[in-house]
Image (spheres, helix red, strand yellow):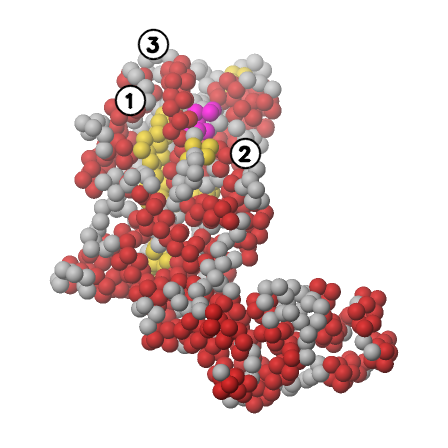
């Protein structure tokens, strides 16, 4: 019995294939490990006879019980052909060899957006993950969606992290014989299909099949309107009998790409062809791709899944491949991405990640004015992505040019953002659209017709561009919070043309943290940011104008800065003392001072890195606020610059640091106040502390706006920089003198 051949059952074959994926093994790699040729591995995976000992070895390597894989009591080799005169395996191998160059040519490279040249697919391909449940079909309410966001990352509202369980793409293909893969524009659907074709023809995936790759747009527009079988034959091999045999015996991996790219006039014919073809050759493996929300297609025998957004591991994997052997290092890109959460949101889309890599490769960094980068991403989704591939989409509403689509999205963005509506119901979105299109030239005045038009426009924006997407049944959001913020800012600048009313409306939100990015984008988009920055400055000054103690504190900040002999901007020095006086260190690490003068080094427990003229004060405050340092650091061993203090002060300071009494901190404080005007206990009330923190945060926003490469006149920039963080009395005095 030891030499008896065994056969894999259909269920066992599926288990084995999933195990190969789980252990990242190819047939070739498995054969090499077991020191056999690839032929018996192929037989094992196609239900053909395999030597018993080798059968068991294969199962052991795949961590499978061979008894659960083998066919029960096989009596003879299973029938693999309906006609004994046909050697289907030989035909498969012959056809595979014939079409290999064609598959490699059509699927072996990719070129998107502004790539200067094609890139080999295997050099850049990143494994795709699949969601078993379609995101837009989930039965969740807005409160549930918000709760999911909060549980993951409330600052980003988790818009790209709300996902069902993910499975590897190859595993999904193995699991379902007929698969419909849905996804947003640029989600990587075509790339995944090309990868399947390359893996198959290379013998790494379903090596017993023949990959057949069909671009449905080309099929639909082919001359003389051939049937699908005829088109496949003409595109791949002759004679027709060979491909028919392969399809009849279920030996094809049929890859149908881009159902959404078929023109409206061809749609019914192509759908009929696909249904008849898949029903006529049911033993084959079918994988078809289509954009989400393209149409209400019905393929009853196809299982629908969705391409998941890239996660951190996929982003890192893609980046390492992209920047391999290039001047820009992948770790540099990843570091800058981690430092900018808004840009990182875009990286979850393979298309937009490609755009980010292209932009970063060109300059070695992301632009300071992020609105330019976002505009490029939007252009890719609104115009370039289809245009580069020669795809003409049907215009649901003829009067909606690209600019008007952007104006419509801007209107929806501001309305929902003002109401903190990161998720909004379909009916609300359709109402916003109705209100917009009713005012277009020659718009339909019939309310029912307008309603139908708004439904189609919403679906079109989701399908064509992926900028607004369904998060659950009849609940939508912008695809990225970044785009929601961008279009909100665009409404102020482009649609409302930075009118006084619009800017006053925007500035009313200056103390709200969630509006921060909108301010930065609005400043960056503005042809001139002068008026907006002046309004922001007025709002900042007015925040603490009436509080005498807070004004006294600012006066102290001003006086301290005047005694510093340094080349740094006075505004940055004031920020330094504001942060010291607030006792916010080390948490904020001189963030405000850095934003107002980027030559000032961010410091965390490290006085030696601080600007020369400010380091003593920083060091003293750290020791005053953190008693632990008294026991671990000798002032003069780690900080020799203190030797420059007058001898009498140096002696006094040494006495304090060596003193182990409980009141030594208070002695140090008195010494600092007497000799350095530092260490005051301002005894701010809770409300005053909150106001000062708010004041600090919006001044930091102002600093970031000024440093964002926005266009602002030299006069206004200087006026704002010179008066930042000054008490109101000083500001008024300067205004009178000017």
- Looking at the rendering, the stretch of residues picked out in magenta corresponds to 195-203
Q: Viewer-nearest of labels 2 and 1?
A: 1
- Which residue is tagged 2? 24
Against 319, residue 156 (above or below) is below
Which is nearer the eye, 372 or 709? 709
Q: Position of residue 378 (x, y in %)?
A: 37, 53
Please say whether residue 202 is one of the residues in the magenta stretch: yes
- Badge 3 marks a residue whose secondary structure is loop
- Which residue is tagged 3? 85
Q: Viewer-nearest of labels 3 and 2?
A: 2
Can residue 692 be seen here? The reply is: yes
Q: Which badge, 1 or 3, comes first in the chain's sequence?
A: 3
Q: Position of residue 151 (x, y in %)?
A: 50, 61
Q: Tell me if label 3 and label 2 are in contact, CB under 8 Å.
A: no
Q: Position of residue 702 (x, y in %)?
A: 50, 71
Residue pictured at 71% horizontal, 83% vertical: 677
Q: Residue farthest to the front?
A: 738
- Which residue is tagged 1? 233
Residue density around tag 1, few if under 14, some if 14–19, many if 20 or more, within 10 Å: some
Q: Which badge, 3 or 2, comes first in the chain's sequence?
A: 2
- Report the quarter where the N terminus lies: top right
Against 292, residue 50 (above or below) is above
Residue pictured at 24% horizontal, 33% vertical: 220
Against 39, residue 518 (above or below) is below
Q: Viewer-nearest of labels 1 and 3?
A: 1
Can residue 196 be seen here? The reply is: no
Q: Position of residue 604 (x, y in %)?
A: 68, 65
Marks 2 and 1, how far apart at CA = 34 Å
Marks 3 and 2, how far apart at CA = 38 Å
Residue density around tag 3, few if under 14, some if 14–19, many if 20 or more, within 10 Å: few
Residue pictured at 38% horizontal, 67% vertical: 417
Q: Residue farthest to the top?
A: 85
């Amino acid at each position: 019995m030891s030499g008896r051949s065994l056969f894999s059952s259909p269920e066992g074959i599926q288990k084995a294939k999933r195990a190969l994926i789980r252990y990242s093994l190819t047939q070739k790699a498995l054969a090499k490990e077991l020191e056999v040729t690839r032929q018996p591995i192929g037989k094992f995976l196609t239900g053909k006879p395999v030597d018993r000992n080798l059968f068991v070895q294969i199962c052991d390597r795949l961590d499978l019980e061979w008894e659960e894989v083998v066919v029960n009591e096989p009596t003879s080799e299973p029938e693999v052909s309906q006609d004994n005169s046909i050697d289907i395996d030989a035909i498969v191998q012959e056809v595979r060899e014939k079409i290999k160059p064609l598959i490699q040519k059509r699927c072996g490279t990719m070129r998107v957006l502004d790539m200067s040249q094609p890139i080999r697919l295997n050099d850049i391909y990143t494994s795709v993950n699949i969601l078993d449940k379609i995101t837009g079909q989930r039965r969740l309410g807005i409160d549930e969606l918000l709760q999911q966001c909060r549980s993951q990352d409330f600052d980003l509202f988790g818009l790209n992290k709300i996902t069902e369980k993910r499975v590897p793409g190859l595993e999904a293909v193995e699991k379902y014989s007929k698969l419909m893969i849905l996804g947003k524009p640029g989600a990587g659907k075509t790339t995944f299909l090309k990868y399947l074709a390359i893996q198959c023809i290379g013998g790494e995936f379903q090596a017993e099949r023949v990959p057949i790759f069909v671009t449905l747009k080309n099929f639909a527009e082919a001359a003389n309107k051939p049937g699908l079988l005829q088109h496949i034959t003409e595109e791949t091999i002759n004679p027709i009998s060979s491909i028919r045999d392969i399809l009849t015996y279920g030996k094809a991996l049929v890859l149908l790409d881009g159902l959404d790219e078929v023109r409206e006039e061809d749609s019914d014919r192509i759908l009929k062809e696909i249904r008849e073809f898949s029903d006529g050759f049911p033993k084959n493996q079918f994988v078809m791709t289509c954009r989400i929300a393209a149409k209400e297609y019905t393929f009853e025998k196809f299982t629908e899944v969705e391409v998941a957004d890239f996660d951190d591991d996929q982003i890192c994997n893609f980046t390492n491949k992209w920047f391999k052997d290039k001047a820009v290092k992948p770790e540099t890109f990843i570091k800058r991405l981690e430092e900018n959460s808004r840009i990182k949101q875009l990286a979850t889309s393979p298309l937009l990640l490609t755009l980010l890599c292209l932009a970063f490769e060109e300059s070695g960094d992301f632009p300071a004015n992020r609105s330019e980068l976002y505009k490029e991403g939007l252009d890719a989704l609104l115009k370039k992505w289809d245009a580069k591939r020669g795809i003409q989409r049907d215009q649901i509403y003829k009067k909606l040019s690209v600019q008007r689509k952007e104006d419509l999205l801007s209107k929806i963005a501001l309305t929902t953002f003002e109401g903190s509506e990161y998720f909004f119901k379909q009916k609300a979105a359709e109402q916003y659209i109705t209100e917009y299109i009713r005012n277009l030239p020659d718009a339909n005045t019939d309310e029912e017709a307008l309603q139908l038009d708004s439904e189609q426009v919403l679906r079109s924006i989701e399908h064509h561009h992926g900028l607004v997407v369904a998060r659950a049944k009849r609940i939508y959001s912008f695809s990225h919070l970044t785009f929601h913020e961008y279009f909100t800012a665009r409404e102020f600048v482009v649609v409302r043309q930075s009118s006084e009313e619009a800017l006053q409306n925007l500035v009313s939100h200056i103390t709200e943290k969630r509006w921060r990015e909108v301010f930065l984008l609005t400043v960056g988009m503005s042809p001139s940011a002068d008026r907006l920055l002046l309004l922001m400055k007025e709002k900042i000054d007015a925040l603490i104008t009436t509080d005498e103690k807070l004004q006294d504190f600012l006066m102290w900040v001003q006086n301290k800065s005047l005694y510093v002999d340094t080349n740094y901007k006075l505004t940055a020095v004031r920020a330094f003392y504001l942060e010291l006086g607030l006792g916010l260190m080390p948490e904020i690490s001189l963030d405000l001072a850095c934003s107002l003068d980027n030559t000032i080094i961010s410091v965390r427990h490290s006085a030696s890195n601080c600007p020369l003229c400010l380091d003593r004060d920083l060091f003293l405050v750290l020791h005053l606020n953190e008693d632990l340092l008294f026991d671990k650091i000798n002032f003069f061993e780690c900080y020799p610059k203190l030797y420059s203090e007058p001898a009498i002060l140096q002696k006094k300071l040494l006495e304090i640091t060596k003193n182990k009494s409980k009141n030594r901190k208070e002695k140090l404080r008195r010494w600092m106040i007497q000799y350095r005007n530092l260490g005051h206990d301002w005894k701010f009330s809770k409300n005053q502390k909150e106001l000062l923190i708010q004041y600090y945060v919006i001044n930091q926003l102002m600093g970031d706006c000024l440093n964002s490469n926005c266009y602002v006149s030299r006069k206004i920039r200087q006026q704002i920089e010179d008066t930042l963080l000054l008490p109101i009395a000083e500001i008024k005095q300067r205004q009178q003198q000017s």
